[in-house]
Amino acid sequence: MRAVLTWRDKAEHCINDIAFKPDGTQLILAAGNRLLVYDTSDGTLLQPLKGHKDTVYCVAYAKDGKRFASGSADKSIIIWTSKLEGILKYTHNDSIQCVSYNPVTHQLASCSSSDFGLWSPEQKSISKHKSSSKIICCSWTNDGQYLALGMFNGIISIRNKNGEEKVKIERPGGSLSPVWSICWNPSREEHNDILAVADWGQKLSFYQLSGKQIGKDRVLNFDPCCISYFTKGEYILLGGSDKQVSLFTKDGVRLGTVGEQNSWVWTCRVKPDSNYVVVGCQDGTISFYQLIFSTVHGLYKDRYAYRDSMTDVIVQHLITEQKVRMKCKELVKKIAIYRNRLAIQLPEKILIYELYSEDSSDMHYRVKERIVKKFECNLLVVCANHIILCQEKRLQCLSFSGVKEREWQMESLIRYIKVIGGPPGREGLLVGLKNGQILKIFVDNLFAIILLKQATAVRCLDMSASRKKLAVVDENDTCLVYDIDTKELLFQEPNANSVAWNTQCEDMLCFSGGGYLNIKASTFPVHRQKLQGFVVGYNGSKIFCLHVFSISAVEVPQSAPMYQYLDRKMFKEAYQIACLGVTDTDWHELAMEALEGLDFETAKKAFIRVRDLRYLELISSIEERKKRGETNKDLFLADVFSYQGKFHEAAKLYKRSGHENLALEMYTDLRMFEYVKDFLGSGDPKEIKMLITKQADWARNIKEPKAAVEMYISAGEHVKAIEICGHHGWVDMLIDIARKLDKAEREPLLLCATYLKKLDSPDYAAETYLKMGDLKSLVQLHVETQRWDEAFALGEKHPEFKDDIYVPYAQWLAENDRFEEAQQAFHKAGRQREAVQVLEQLTDNAVAESRFNDAAYYYWMLSMQCLDIAQDPAQKDVMLGKFHHFQRLAELYHAYHAIHRHTEDPFSVHGPETLFNISRFLLHSLPKDTPSGISKVKILFTLAKQSKALGAYRLARHAYDKLQGLYIPARFQKSIELGTLTIRAKPFHDSEELVPLCYRCSTNNPLLNNLGNVCINCRQPFVFSASSYDVLHLVEFCLEEGITDEEAISLIDLEAPRPKREDRQRETINNSSQILQLVETKDSMGDEDPFTAKLSFEQGGSEFVPVMVSRLVLRSMSRRDVIIKRWPPPLRWQYFRSLLPDASITMCPSCFQMFHSEDYELLVLQHGCCPYCRRRKDDPGP
């Protein structure tokens, strides 16, 4: 650091204070009772300001630059505008010692000997606060929140914006150490506010806002009068009784003297945002200095060491951008770096550092040696075991212990010195002198070797990596390159201020100058590009450039020198340059040029760098052919041209080398069909057809499908044309192709039909299948498109496809939850097993879901299915057994549906008598193994409730007793327990009105019949109504042997006349039912009926004896009195005779269930069908 005096002036009086305008253009001085305004650029006195009547002690400028304030011994404060006009004046009770503007709010603090005041433009009055001692100095924090006051009694008081004391700092010296100057650090980067304090105890101290001292007091050895920070807070200026201004670091380390004066320095200030300093003295001298901070640094390859904040050293790795800082806490004067060594010269010693490890990226240094001795030198160089000091013409070599080992005396001033490497302890130094001599010195040799001598002084030197060439920059800014061995000047270039050889390439160097970077390869012309700064190193593609105080690594593509070598077909040299760093495009260009020059080795390495496998395969194939003895360079070059897209040149070379077929193949592969036609001329039709096919392939690949289709059709490639049409969904073109094709061409026709089917055009697909005569595929088409009507029509014409139609139809119905229709379709297709499976599954589901009426219906359908299968003699017995089993289950579930609804639903649709009859029917009909889903508890509970309600107390008591032996659900528990208790209060008999009557033997049967639903006397089975479940007045009779069903019908239809019997019976027959009505007249009661005579029965055993009727009896019967269940074979018909002429009975012609006619008609009206088999009213009979 050195200070250069810019201008100086002298006032008549002592300079008490100085203030800069924030933009740095004006300088305000307090001298005598006037203010002096100077132009900072040249020291011109602009204007003296008069306003005070006594000595002006202080002056301060507002941060916004609009006004400044001055304070005087006349006890007044004057506010001035930036136009040097006084606008306001206010006073204190004592002389004004200091003033300071708040940097944020522009509030003005004015301090006197006994108090201080706070004033802002918004306030009309000044708020004043008493002080216990004389206030000498004051300073605001950066954020304007706190004001520090320095007092004569050695106390520092920190106040808030309202003047309230927050912190009090007492200096150790007390009143013997008046606090003469204080200043807050203006840096925004500091985490805490730091206050610098200079007192007349001759100490410099630092405090935090909290009042805590930072570090120890720094002894000054003079009385400080003023302290001032640089704008960014990195340095401190301090002046006083030592008649000079000293520069300190922000931590209080003294760096040097700014300027020596002839009297005490009362004030010093730094020009905002600059390195200019103004000094005001006791004798009225005003000095304006420029501080020049020289660059202290060192460079070795990719490590750069430089001084920071004057006391720190930062080592930067230029490649990895890692940095390490070493705090020396003293002024760093010189830095040298070499390999793993770092030397730092401080004022009283030299520190030698070494790296922890040999790792090239290691950045950890440790102190190896300390040479505690003061040295004066111009240049410092460090080697492995020595340091070299340069003092004007003399070089000294010292060991790390500080012992001088040897010394060299030069003829002229040493201008440049550089370590050029060598073994440890024997390194070589390159030295350039002012007289133009260039020497090589080895540290272990007393004799210097003169490399060459030139006429001009040396400014910069560098030696090539092989030590064969030397580059010199002289004082005329000329770069000269010499051959060291011959001393011959190889070339020279103007406008150079520094030079560096490439450490990885012998023939490349760069030099900077005039704002340009110049790169020179071999003897080729220089390549220039803009660059500010000095070149200090060149490694590969990185150029290290020093600009102002920082160094940076600039990535410079080596494209220009590489192309210079390529122009001369020097491929290997171009490859070496490219290895230093070029773009991928440059690598590709190098590879191509080498390939065309048939330098396959260089081309291969270049293509590997750009990872171009295509060209690597080409080179590999050429190398293989060369190994096999092929030497035709024209053929090799033709392959290269074809790969590069130079097809016409390749074709000419193919033709010249006698390989016309390769040219034809190339053009065909490239779809250059016009060139192929020219090449072929009028050739073989097969080749032309092949050409059309290839052209069509190409049209397909370049997404011109319609053109490709036309070409394929013209070439006879119908399958490919159809595939394209199908892929693009062109139905019209597919239809045209299908109609034009011959029916014998099955493969393309089949493909057409397949695509038409996929494209949702089943009609055209059907047309194609018909053209082929492929009926099976046509059936499959109808089935897949679910066009069942067309499929059924085709099935009628061709019964062999019945299974192919009805089975998928049934599956489709089942998938769409139309299970009943699916079952019928399976049955129609002859798939009895599947039909039965569907019904069984439906039945199981219905039972599981408690849909017992559906279960009854499905069991009835199952029984009828089994009856249909029973027509097969082989399965007759098994199927008839299943028929009767399913019929019983259908009856049980049909009846149980009413019980289930009564117990589960809140409202019942059945009357008590019906529920009573159903419960008895179920109880008498249930087998030992109760069918799934049927609950005996619900049956007995219903029976007990209805029996009690109808007066059948004995039966109710029996039902309740039975319930006690069963597991009862919790929801019925309470009702059953209550019923069991209350039934005990009822008589132990049943109402006689409820007792059922056998219409065959007229026997009253008990309500609880151990034999089941048959008469206890004649064993005749009761016939129940399928709705109310009371016993119908029907008696089943059988035909005598030899009488067929047809004969029986004919005999009954004869209706032989019977005397005195008129309109006794009336039968109504319609499509949905057969109704028999018996109407008695007065004369009919006494008639003798042959059938009635047959009903006489004598109790003679436990076996049931059916009623057998002869032809005579049949002839005597009226058709209206007989109901016939006309079962399909192999079952026999069942005949029933009505015995009560006044009651009408209806039988469903489908399921043969009996109903009271009124009940049946009501149920059909409600449901629209038979409640048992769900036969609709308008369906035709069986």
Image (tube, rainbow, N blue to C red):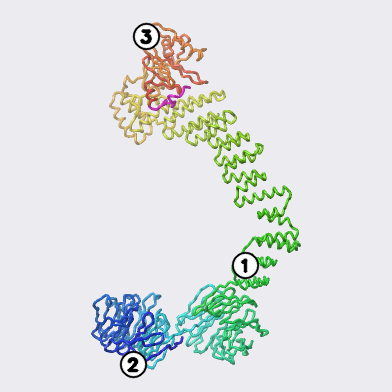
Task: Say which residue appears at 43% left-offset and 35% top-offset.
Answer: 848
When asked about the image quadrant of residue 69, the answer is bottom left
**Residue 982 inside the magenta-drawn segment:** no
- Viewer-proximal residue among 1020 and 721: 721
Circle 1 residue = 587
Circle 3 residue = 1084
Q: Residues within 10 Å of mark 1 (few under 14, many from 20)?
A: many
Circle 3 — which element? loop
Residue 937 visible in the displayed image: no
Q: Are dots 1 and 3 in contact, CB under 8 Å?
A: no
In this picture, is 718 found above or below 1118?
A: below
Of the residues under marks 3 and 2, which one precedes in the sequence? Answer: 2
Q: CA distance from mark 3 to mark 2?
A: 169 Å
- Decide if residue 347 is on the left or right side of residue 20: right
Task: Where is residue 243? Give x, y as percent.
Answer: 38, 91
Q: CA distance from mark 1 to mark 3?
A: 128 Å
Q: Nearer the viewer, mark 1 or mark 3?
A: 1
When asked about the image quadrant of residue 1011, the answer is top left
Q: CA distance from mark 1 to mark 2?
A: 76 Å
In this picture, is 967 found above or below 1056?
A: below
Q: Label 2 is placed on what type of residue?
A: Glu
Circle 1 — which element? helix
Q: Are dots 3 and 2 in contact, CB under 8 Å?
A: no
In this picture, is 1045 found above or below 68?
A: above
Circle 2 residue = 12
Residue 515 visible in the displayed image: yes
In this picture, is 1047 found above or below 366?
A: above
Q: Which residues are magenta?
A: 1166-1182
Q: Residues within 10 Å of mark 3 (few under 14, many from 20)?
A: some
* Dot label at residue 278: none
